Amino acid sequence: VTTHADCSLDDLITILAKRRIGTVVVIDRNQQVIGIVSERDIIRHLSTGGATADTLTKNIMTSKVITVESNITSAQLMQLMTEHRIRHLPITRDGKLVGIVSIGDVVKRLLEKYEQEAELIKQFINS
């Protein structure tokens, strides 16, 4: 799910609520990532009293977006997310958005990996 920089706060909140998501990537006409906005960003701006329903996404979004290429490992994702205290990372190819990964996705993948490794160790011990 993406939006554009001129999307109103009201429309942005509708997108988040309708899709039941917490983050939207902001892209330009060429599918280039130019920002990311989360529920936390919205709450922060609303709490300062400066945001209204007419506020534009470009005034709320984080414009210094950390993106990753699709060949990154789960361990590298976890390290980046922990280091930068972020819960979502856009995945790009040649600067264009191809997906997004959440901390939940990473934890799920790492748990699967560790469960497989534990099973292999059990099989080795029992053989």
Image: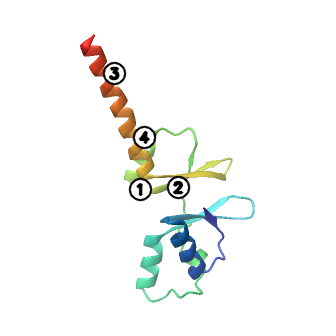
Q: Amino acid at mark 4?
A: Arg
Observer-side mark, 1 or 3, equals 3
Farthest residue toward the left?
A: 125
Neighbour tally class for label 3: few under 14, some 14-19, many 20 plus, Cα within 10 Å = few
Considering every residue shown, the one lying at the far top of the view is 127
**Residue 50 to residue 37: above or below:** below
Picture disc at residue 109: 4
Q: Assign the C terminus to one quadrant of the image.
A: top left
Residue 81 horizontal/vertical position (percent): 42, 52
Vertical arrangement, residue 44 with respect to residue 86, above or below: below
Q: Helix, strand, or loop for circle 1?
A: helix
Would you say the residues marked 2 and 1 are in contact, meaning their CB atoms lie under 8 Å apart? yes
Q: Upstream in the sequence, badge 4 or badge 3?
A: 4
What residue did someone put label 1 on? Answer: 84
- Label 3 is placed on what type of residue? Leu
Q: Which label was assigned to residue 98? A: none
Element marked by disc 2: loop
Sequence-wise, the earlier of marks 2 and 3 is: 2
In the picture of the structure, the residue carrying the numbered disc 2 is 66
Q: Between label 2 and label 3, give the one nearer the viewer.
A: 3
Q: Which x, y percent locates residue 30?
A: 74, 59
